[in-house]
Structure formats: structure tokens, C-alpha cells
Image (cartoon, grey):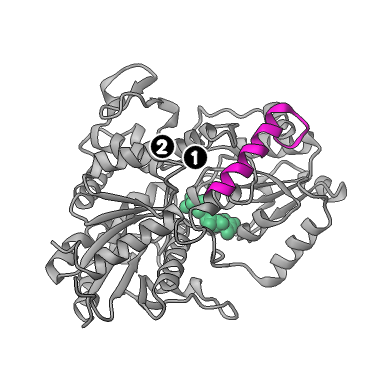
Amino acid sequence: GEEARNLHVVLFPFLAHGHIPAFLRLAGHLQALRPGLDVTLVSTPRLLGSLCPPGATSPPVQLHALPFTPADHGLPDGAESLADLHVHQFITFFQASESLRPAFDGFVAGIASPVCIIADAFFAWTADVARARGASHAVFLPGGAFGNAVFFSVWEHLPHTLTAGDEFPLLDFPDVVLHRTQLPRFMLAATGTDPWTAFFRRVIASCRKTNAVLVNTVQELEPSGLAMLRAIFGVQILPIGLVLTAPAPSKSHDDDDARIIEWLDAHPPRSVLYISFGSQNSISIHQMAELALGLEASGRPFLWAVRPPVGFEPTGGFDPRWLPAGFEDRIAQASKGLLVRGWAPQARILAHPSTGAFMTHCGWNSILEGVSHGVPLLGWPLGAEQFFNAMVVVEWGVCAEVARGNLESSAVERGEVAEAVGMVMGETEKGEGMRRNAGATARAMAAAWQGPGGSSAVSLEGFLRCVETSLLLR
Ligand code: UDP
């Protein structure tokens, strides 16, 4: 077919810090495959501002801001990201995000060249915009295949509402058996007529109208998860799992980052445990106390990116009341631990040779950032599809789950924390196996983008050719 001229790719990540870096990396890959390609990343003004703070290298794409007034939806002023909100405000935010449609439509309508929209699943309604404007359309899942497939399958059928037991199979994939403790609180409370179910069923319906779903995973690592997504959406599913070519945008100050890297430099290779629960999830204050005391008891050096515990102001600054009395002084005196009180330079921390293990909430970016550097994981999934991501990394043999959730019922005990840390970082058979598997998985991730024959490179190239030759246009 005839190649379209001046293809313009419009990227539209969901309004969450964990979703934007993967879209930026996608932009980098698209521009590497097609030098000079027009790529615009669309978001809200404050989020775009945080991508290029003064002094930071600006992302390699054009930026377009859509007007968004959180107060119109009963949300706090300036709340443009899930990280700015309490969990009970999330659904309002998801619904409010649908109000971006007219402005997004206007932006696409104003582009004279052929357009390809690549939107987050939570913005899958853009498939209708694409159809109306003659654009091609793909959904990009910044998460993994299995995690997303399970997440959508549960929203579609709410299998846990059909049984009184703690365990239940997925209706469409009966080989996958979940436990109630693996459901985020909104799913657990879902009835089928609640706003969360309604929102995600709209998402699923819209995803079925897209031309292709791009997934941030690697064919060789998640064949069955990819097959599940194909069954759910009935469209082309393309694993384009990304090597981490572009660092995540930094929100922190260079001085703070330098202090952290210096601290790591002063430690032996693979000796430090890094702890982070991502950009928008928190553990409870009781769990924080057990974690703190367990880390102390482990005797291993640790670097902990501390977020406000559940129920505390999500955008509030560090408060010593979050942690057991005297904890910070004791660990500082013993040079055992360093607390990061704001945004951590996570990608740099995980790439640092002193980092030996990563306690993570199993957000997909965190998983990729850790495992791509051969760092084994201690999993503590908290929400969204993180519980299912944890199943994937446990299956890869790179993760041990230490805890689950932040509900009242999710007890965590300091002794177990200390034991798990000793296992993953010490000379134990299990720990050594996990480190070996993490190394092998890292090589599989890198291979997906090595040379033109890597599986992810082939998928993305194939996708671009389809778009350019309008094969995907219906
Ligand atoms: N991140 C970071 N510093 C922090 C917290 C998070 O750089 O203090 C980055 C992290 O490197 C990752 C992203 O934010 O790229 C979090 O994404 P993930 O999918 O792991 O979790 P989410 O925040 O979406 O739950």
C-alpha cells in the first residue's frame, strides 16, 4: 500500500505518574524506528509541567495540554494525578477524566496529517474519537499482560460475587484461581451496579473497538497473559515490552538525588534493599511500624522511599509520626538506613550496583525497572492489578510475596519481614535462585529489543507499517 505522509502519533497516557514514563519510552522507540516522526503527548497542564521541571531535559516529544479543572468535579484544586488524591476519591477522578473528551476531540480534529491515537486503556473512549475523525487507534497498556487480563476479566464477571468461599476461578480462564485477599478494595466491594464496575465495563467495551492493543511486556515472558488479552478484547495484541531507554521523569531535586546516589556508592555491591510502594499507594501506619522494625531487625542496609500512610494527606510532607519513635535516629546512627522523604530517583537506584533487592508494591514499571537490572523482588501488592503482577513475578522465580494489601485484615509481622529480607539478600538457596532467575529474565527483556529481530521490535515495526499502510483503518 501507499505510505501515508507525515503520520502524527498522538499519545494519551492516563493521568498517573506510573503511566506516563512508559508512554515516553514508547515515543522514544517510535522515533527511533521512524526518525522525524511527529509525536505529541497529550495530558493536563500540571502533569505536563512535572515532566519538564526547570533544569530537566525535556522529553523528546511535543506536548499538548488539555484544560482540566478538578474543582468542577468536586476534586481538590490542582489534583491532576491519582497521586494527589485519597483512594476514596479515585473513582471521581476516573469519571472526571472522561470530561477531557471534547477538548481531546478538538485537538485531533485540528491535525491536518493522518493521525494515529495511542491511548491508555482508561482513555479507550478515544477509539470513538478516532473513528469519527478517520484516525487509526491503539490502546497501550503500560502494565503487563497477565495482570491486565485478570483485572479486566474480574471486572467483567465479578467471579468473587458468585461464591462464598475465599478462592474462586476466573469465569473465562478457570485455570486462574484467585484468593479474595488478591482483590483491590473496590473490586471486593463491587456489586455490578457500582460506579467502578460501570467505569471498567465502559473501558472494556471501548477496548473492543480499538484496532490493536500494545502491551508493555515481552512475548517470551508472558505468552499466556497475552493469549488471555487476545481472548478478552478480540483484537490484535502486540507485545512491545520496552527496554528502559529513557529514564522516568524526575520530580526530585538533583541535590537530593546526588545525596542518595552517594549513599549507595558507599555500600558494597548488592548489599542494599530498596523499598518503595510506587507513586500512589500507601501502607497503613501499623504496617509501617512493623516494616520499619523488621528492616531494623534484618541488619541489612536499606533505602526506603517513604510515602504518607493510608489516611494521611497524600500530598503532605514527611511527618515523623508516621514511623516508630526514635527509628530514624537509630538507623542514621548505625548508618543502616536512609529514608527518602519525597520522590526517589527510583530508576537510578535500581540501576545502581549496590542495590541488591527491591521490596515493591508490584506496580509494573517498578517490576520492569528492578528485574531489567537483575534485582530480585520482595512483593507487597497493594491495589489495582498489582496482586496479579505479583503472581507473574513469582512464576518467573524472581519474587517472594511478603505481604498483601493494606486493609485492616492485612497483618504484617516484623519477624517475617526480617526473615524475608535475610532470605532474598543472604547466601540462601532461595535467594541465590531468585538472583539467577532475575538475571535470566533481564536478558530476555533486553533481547526483545536487540537487533531488528527482537520480538518487541518486530511487533512495533509491524504495527507502524499497518498504520502507515492504513491496514488498520476500518
Ligand atoms: N517512582 C519514582 N520515585 C518514587 C516513586 C515512584 O521514580 O518515589 C517511579 C518509578 O520508578 C516508576 C513509577 O514511578 O517508574 C511508578 O510506577 P509503577 O507502575 O511501579 O507504580 P504506580 O505508581 O503506578 O502504582
What x and y, as percent, mark residue 442? Answer: 58, 48
Q: Residue at x 40, y 33 (%)?
A: 183
> Label 1 is placed on what type of residue?
Leu
Residue 142 vs residue 47, the one in the foreground = 142
Q: Residues within 10 Å of mark 2 (few under 14, many from 20)?
A: many
With respect to residue 36, does 260 lie above or below?
A: above
> Label 2 is placed on what type of residue?
Pro
The residue segment tinted magenta is: 424-444
Quadrant in which residue 182 is drawn? top left
The answer to whether one can see residue 279 in this image is no
Q: Is residue 242 magenta?
A: no
Q: Is residue 203 left or right of residue 426?
A: left
- Name the disc covering residue 382, or none: 1
With respect to residue 122, does 41 lie above or below?
A: below
- Element on which disc 1 rests: loop
Mark 2 = which residue? 184
Measured in 3D between alpha carbons, the distance from the residue under mark 2 to the one under mark 1, in whole angstroms, is: 7 Å
The quadrant of the picture occupied by the N terminus is bottom left
What x and y, as percent, mark residue 122? Answer: 31, 54
What x and y, as percent, mark residue 418? Answer: 73, 31
Instruction: Check the image and name the residue furthest to the top.
Output: 165
Residue 373 vs residue 20, the one in the foreground = 373
Q: Is mark 1 within 8 Å of ligand 1?
A: no
Q: Is residue 438 magenta?
A: yes
Q: Is mark 2 within 8 Å of ligand 1?
A: no
Q: Is residue 466 left or right of residue 93?
A: left
The quadrant of the picture occupied by the C terminus is bottom left
Magenta stretch mostly in which secondary structure?
helix
- Name the disc covering residue 21, or none: none
